[in-house]
Amino acid sequence: MIQSIQEAATYLQNATDNYAPEFGIILGTGLGALVNEVQVAYSLSYADIPHFPVSTVESHSGKLIFGLLAGRRVVVMQGRFHYYEGYTMNQVVFPVRVMKLLGIRKLFVSNAAGGLDPAFNMSDLMVITDHINLLPGNPLIGKNLDELGPRFPDMSDVYDEEMIRQAMVIAEDAGFDLREGVYVSAPGPMLETKAEYKFMRIIGADAVGMSTVPEIIAARHMGLPVFAVSVITDMCTPGQLKQVVLADILAAAAKAEPHMTMLIRELIRNS
Ligand code: HPA
């Protein structure tokens, strides 16, 4: 495993003339427009990177993009791997581990999520302050990769408080509401039942999605500070729950995307 991660990192260093990104960014469903603000230096297909999981889905032709955002060197994952696609947890987090070996100092993650807090509205942004893992596994199970991090990494303080505080200031200065809350990861790919949403609310979640938690766990295992934000693409509360289709999720994500991009760009500028 370690050898595969190293080989992928070495390939990328050679292919990008040792670009040495400072920040890693993972973009969620419908939230890819941030890439338009990146001054792209290198763009590499996942399929060309040794040991990278290969997407079986045609529409998920992923790219790893190296370039400048707010004048800083970033590496952006355009397209991520979800557990529901059939990847192992180690495959889902493989790119995060490679980005760490490339030298990133912080990880930024976005996702599309369903709203469980009845005070939320569609297209709200929610900064993730904590998470609950309801996936049937996690990327640290098995022999510990001692080169990456400890056997029992602490999870009492996962999301970087200073970046959360800065995000609140950025949103206030820009004049938009930024919510805060707990993200729960569900296996998917089906959306959840009414009873499941009720359960998730009772256990303390404010938003639900099918990604992010594995990548965050892998990042924290390696000691990387993380910032994560959910775009509320549909409401899952009693009275507001409707049948959702992907097109609605994409439309709600597109509406919130400019604020999300601004948050990540300004946090990187301040870092
Ligand atoms: N569950 C419910 N609604 C959602 C999700 C989810 O996982 N992702 C985006 N909207």
Image: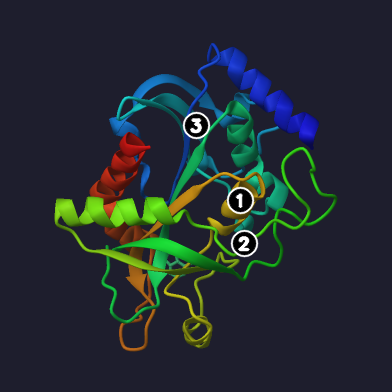
Q: CA distance from mark 2 to mark 3?
A: 30 Å
Name the residue carrying label 2: 155
Q: Which mark is residue 78?
A: none
Q: Nearer the viewer, residue 154 or 228?
A: 154
Disc 1: CA contacts within 10 A as few (<14), some (14-19) or many (>=20): many
Q: Nearer the viewer, residue 27 or 174?
A: 174
Vertical comparison of 14 with 218: above or below: above
| Amino acid tagged 3 | Lys
| Amino acid tagged 1 | Arg
Total numbered circles: 3
Q: Quadrant of residue 8?
A: top right
Task: State left or right for residue 185 relative to residue 90.
Answer: left
Task: State left or right for residue 13 relative to residue 35.
Answer: right
Q: CA distance from mark 3 to mark 1?
A: 24 Å
Task: State left or right for residue 66 relative to residue 231.
Answer: right
Q: CA distance from mark 1 to mark 2?
A: 8 Å
Q: Position of residue 224 (x, y in %)?
A: 57, 44
Q: Position of residue 196 (x, y in %)?
A: 53, 83
| Amino acid tagged 2 | Met
Assess whether mark 2 and mark 1 are in contact (beta carbons under 8 angstroms).
yes
